[in-house]
Amino acid sequence: MAITQGAKKAHRSSLRKQEFNLRRKGKVSRAIKSLKKLIASGKNLPAGRQGKEAIQKAFREVQSALDKAVKAKTLKKNTAARKKSRLSKLIKKL
């Protein structure tokens, strides 16, 4: 347990930051899950443009969530780049 006043304040601050970081990471993981679900059901999507547009829209949301997490220093830059690269590779397979 924190003893000094400064340590107590630092602990409160870290708890607030933890809450925001978990929220950001959750948003990233939910976006990635929804994109992977779309990719997995790619054969069942409407033929032509409409199915690919849905996947591209979901991928843009994932990129946005990852970039925001990097900007807030929740994720490291290379981690986000690696995730984006692997997801784009999955999309190109379709």
Image: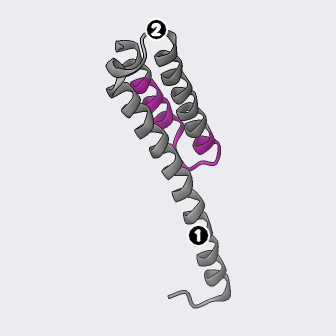
Q: Tell me the SS state at disc 1.
A: helix
Residue type beneath disc 1? Ser
Q: In which quarter of the image is residue 21?
A: bottom right
Query: Does 79 lie within the magenta span?
Result: yes
* Outermost residue to the bottom: 3
Residue at point 32%, 18% (across, down)? 43
Counting residues from the N terminus, which is met first, the one under dot 1 or under dot 2?
1
Residue at point 51%, 23% (across, down)? 54
Q: Position of residue 24 (x, y in %)?
A: 56, 51
**Which mark is drawn over residue 14?**
1
In this view, the mark in front (1 or 2): 2
Magenta stretch bounds: 68-87
Q: Mark 2 points at which residue?
A: 48
Tell me: residue 13, above or below residue 27.
Answer: below
* Foreground residue among 39 and 6: 39
Q: Tell me the SS state at disc 2.
A: loop
Quadrant occupied by the C terminus: top left
Q: Where is residue 3 in the image (x, y as percent from the top left)?
A: 57, 91
Residue type beneath disc 2? Gly
Q: How crowded is mark 2: few (under 14 residues within 10 Å), some or many (20 or more)?
A: few
Q: Which colour scheme is used?
A: one colour
Residue at point 44%, 21% (across, down)? 88
* Foreground residue among 40 and 19: 40
